[in-house]
Image (cartoon, rainbow, N blue to C red):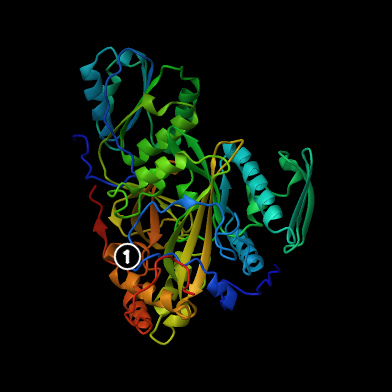
Amino acid sequence: MPATKFTPSITSRPVYDGLTPHGAVPALMLANGPGGEALLELIKTDPTIPGHAHVIYIPEGCGFGKTLESKGFASYFEAASYASVLPRFRKLLAEAGMNTRLYLAGTEGLIGQATSEALEAGMLPEAIDAEHRGSLARRMQCVHCKGITENVTTDPFTCSHCGLSLFVRDHYSHRHAAFQGVCVDAETPGEIPPRQEIKA
Amino acid sequence: MTIQFNDETFRDDYSYHNSAEAIRRFPFPFDKDDYMYAVNMEPHAGGREGSPFENRFDVDEHYVAEMRDREITLNEDPLRCQSLPHMELAGWDLLELIMECKAEDYPELFSLHRDGDRWHWINRPLGIDHKFTFLDPTTLPYGPMEYITRQAQGDFALLDQREGNLWMEAGMVTSQADWSLDFDIGMNFFEWHAPVPKAHEMGIFQRALKFLLAIQQGAPSRRLNWTMTVNPRLDTSPENYHKWGPEKRTLTPENVGEKQFLRVELQTFFRLPRSNGLAFPIRCYLISLQDLVTVPKWGRRLHRVIRDLPDELAEYKGFAVNRQLIIDYLAQFDDGKPTSPGIFPDE
């Protein structure tokens, strides 16, 4: 699956410039699903990368794990979910040296959350590469109850916390790593437009 | 000057009202018969006597009731007031600015006595008499920004300045026109304006940012912004949209004059001395259409502005659904006569 081409979008949405090799420097890599393929393509362009790179991969049903494991990374860890691997990722960030690069590949939710963590840990934005691969699902914050609903693929959708029907507002917060969900039938309770699939 | 403070509400029974004097001094935002976005900045260096531009922080008949409404909103949703940890110094800057200005401009209402860092603040309308140590947060019941903005009308955002941009990193926001501090906190100037249509393409935000980055201490600026709100509600937040949204659909030709309000924001910008941040107060004024048309120039002009406004703007400002009702009502007060330049009533 190739890197996602987004339609020209809103100003608050982050831009993912893709992964570019930075050579034999210490690196952390975090990918989910089809993002694994982006890591494989990256190290193909520069074989000096893996020896210095610690990799966390969340397969989510994708089969890139075996190949990744065989590439001679400084370490390779396969995780069940982002939530489960967060403590490990935080520790790696905390121990990372000044010249460490971070490569992120996969869904917007993963990239957004991992970027917040990295910035929080003191990493500079210019040390982070990100490439979007896979599902166009959005991570949404309900503006009413503040709950996060993961993997939203339709507009409108139902808040998984308070149950309101929310529309997807084209407004993105780096801090929450989420788009904003706003009640779709606030003015006319019960009148909910048909669901449409989110297309980039 | 003595101000008679109204006993009134901004929710439930909506007993909010403007006195004849409050109508005359209303900050009508249109200086001509049409409207398009502009970087409409001017120095905030006083203005016509009795107008909301005269003092740095306008105090009017709604002060006490507005502070009561803020308290209700904060009790229901404490996230309306947030400050990222590095913004505390800017909060003290803001506290100092507001206390100094109010004590100088309204000595009969507010007093500030300073002995080094030992300060004594008296707020007579709210019955506050408080001694505290400047820059020592343990001597205040809230953080410095929250403490002073519970005593000042309007919303407040504190902007950090770095990397050639402004970052909204603290705020007290309980009377907003449909934006969420909790969602926008931490964003830069372009990010938090992302949902605004047209203005990005027009280069408005690039020019506005350049202007704001250059604001100097002691030389604040101001501009007016506007929208429309059904019922005199301060808390038109996205957080509570599902609660106030249905009210938008209750307008009829019979009640539009009474229930439809023009909502005007007097936005001001002050450079802060210690933090080098910007204070961005957003003061909200509400006037019903039936009160507004008592000034003939305003009735004529508002009719023309609303009638000729691009659809996208009416949509963004959230009154597209009621636009025709508003136009039909205002048309009765537009006799087609020319209007004088500027925002103030004639004579």
Q: Disc 1 marks which amino acid?
A: Glu
Q: B346 and B229: which one is in front?
A: B346
Q: Mark 1 — residue? A: B315
Please report the residue visible at 77 percent of the width from the left and 38 percent of the height from the top.
B117
Where does residue A35 sit, x and y in percent of width and height? 27, 32
Does any portion of residue A77 appear in the rendered image? Answer: no
Q: A173 and A29: which one is in front?
A: A173
Q: B145 and B35: which one is in front?
A: B35
Where does residue B135 sit, x and y in percent of width and height? 71, 38
Please report the residue visible at 31 percent of the width from the left and 77 percent of the height from the top.
B324
Q: Relative to B340, say whether A120 is above or below.
A: above
Q: Relative to B115, say whether B106 is above or below.
A: below
Question: Element type at marker 1?
Answer: helix
Residue A51 quadrant? top left
Q: Relative to A45, say whether B232 is above or below.
A: below
Residue B247 quadrant? bottom left
| The N terminus of chain B: image quadrant | bottom right
Q: Residues within 10 Å of mark 1 (few under 14, many from 20)?
A: few
Please report the residue visible at 21 percent of the width from the left and 24 percent of the height from the top.
A41
Q: Residue furthest left?
A: A2
Where does residue A75 sit, x and y in percent of width and height? 38, 18
Where does residue B100 sit, x and y in percent of width and height? 68, 49
Q: Relative to A24, say whether B28 is above or below.
A: below
Relative side of B175 to A154, left or right:
right
